[in-house]
Image (cartoon, rainbow, N blue to C red):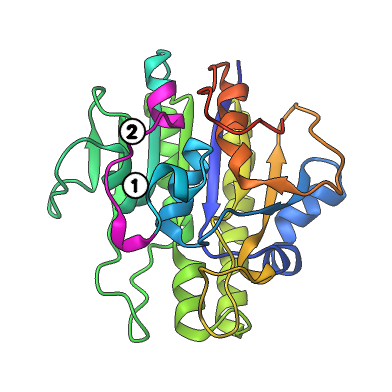
């Protein structure tokens, strides 16, 4: 069975990706990847969407309905089901993922590097972005995040490996989703992926690239506007998938990842699309 790397470009809406991500769009144009439009669940907020993407459930169902209600996941998810099936899991992600899928207290001086085969995320490099704002975005360099993913892939050979980048979301909240700063940061993620994805493919991974939500010009998301709910889904892999014009549901992502890993999805998860 293939191994999967999922890249979440936090805060990157569909139109921003299609207009700014020259590497990803070039791969689509050459037939080396496929791209669909995906609609998120709501409220289109980061914490609820992280759990939705990994459980296949609407926030009203899994219970995390705001960033302020973050807690450990209580439902079957991609990490827990993969680990139960004997797969290895890993992540390079912001600390919300530690709260969700690592059953250990967060230690700000030690938890950024994590190795514990008894937790649902078994190997990880976490970051906090503590105190980010207009003066300092506190965002890790995109190529450094990609490097950490590559090192985890080479050292631990995880079957499921998550890369979560917060920088576009941060710049969107600071300057707005119609700003030069936001668009440039979306491109910066694409630029780093252009150097990393070929290596990940050589290591035997399928690569999926998507976002948790978009960003409007008022520096906001969480509601029902299409710019908040429409995100891209890029796929580098062997599965055929639906027609290019079909609108995908974000709720099908969890089952899709598990299908590609050869792990049975939970019965409560929405249907896979690959």
Residue 88: tell me if it is visible.
no
Magenta-colored stretch includes residue 75: yes
Q: Position of residue 128 (x, y in %)?
A: 27, 60
Depth order, front residue of 54/174: 54
Q: Which mark is residue 121?
A: 2
Q: Which residue is identified by label 1? A: 97
Determine crowd level at label 2: few under 14, some 14-19, many 20+ residues with C-alpha closer than 10 A.
many
Tag 1 and tag 2, C-beta contact below 8 Å:
yes
Q: Is residue 182 left or right of residue 166?
A: right
Number of marks present in the image shown:
2
Q: Is residue 247 left or right of residue 168?
A: right
Write down the region rendered in magenta. Answer: 66-81
- Labels 1 and 2: the sequence-earlier one: 1
Residue shown at the point (40%, 13%) measured from the top left: 86
Residue shown at the point (46%, 78%) measured from the top left: 173
The quadrant in which residue 125 appears is top left
């Amino acid at each position: 069975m293939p191994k999967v790397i999922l890249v979440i470009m936090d805060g990157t809406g569909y139109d921003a990706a299609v207009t700014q991500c020259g590497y990803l769009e070039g791969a689509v144009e050459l037939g080396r990847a496929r791209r669909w439009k995906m609609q998120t669940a709501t409220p289109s907020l980061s914490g609820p969407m992280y759990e939705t993407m990994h459980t296949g459930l609407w926030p009203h169902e899994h219970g995390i309905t705001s960033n302020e209600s973050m807690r450990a996941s209580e439902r079957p998810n991609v990490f827990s089901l993969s680990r139960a099936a004997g797969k290895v899991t890993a992540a390079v992600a912001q600390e919300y993922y530690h709260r969700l899928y690592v059953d250990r207290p967060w230690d700000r001086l030690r938890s950024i590097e994590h190795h514990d085969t008894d937790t649902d995320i078994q190997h990880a490099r976490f970051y906090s972005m503590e105190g980010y704002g207009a003066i300092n975005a506190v965002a890790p360099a995109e190529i450094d995040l990609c490097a950490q993913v590559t090192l985890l892939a080479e050292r631990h050979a995880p079957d499921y490996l998550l890369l979560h980048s917060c920088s576009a979301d941060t710049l969107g909240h600071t300057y707005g989703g119609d700003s030069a700063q936001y668009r440039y940061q979306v491109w910066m993620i694409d630029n780093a992926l252009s150097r990393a994805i070929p290596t990940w493919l050589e290591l035997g991974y399928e690569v999926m690239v998507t976002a948790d939500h978009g960003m409007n010009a008022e520096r906001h998301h969480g509601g029902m506007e299409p710019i908040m709910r429409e995100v891209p889904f890029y796929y580098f892999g062997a599965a055929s998938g639906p027609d290019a014009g079909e609108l995908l549901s974000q709720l099908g992502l969890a089952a899709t990842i598990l299908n590609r890993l050869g792990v049975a999805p939970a019965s409560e998860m929405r249907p896979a699309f690959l």
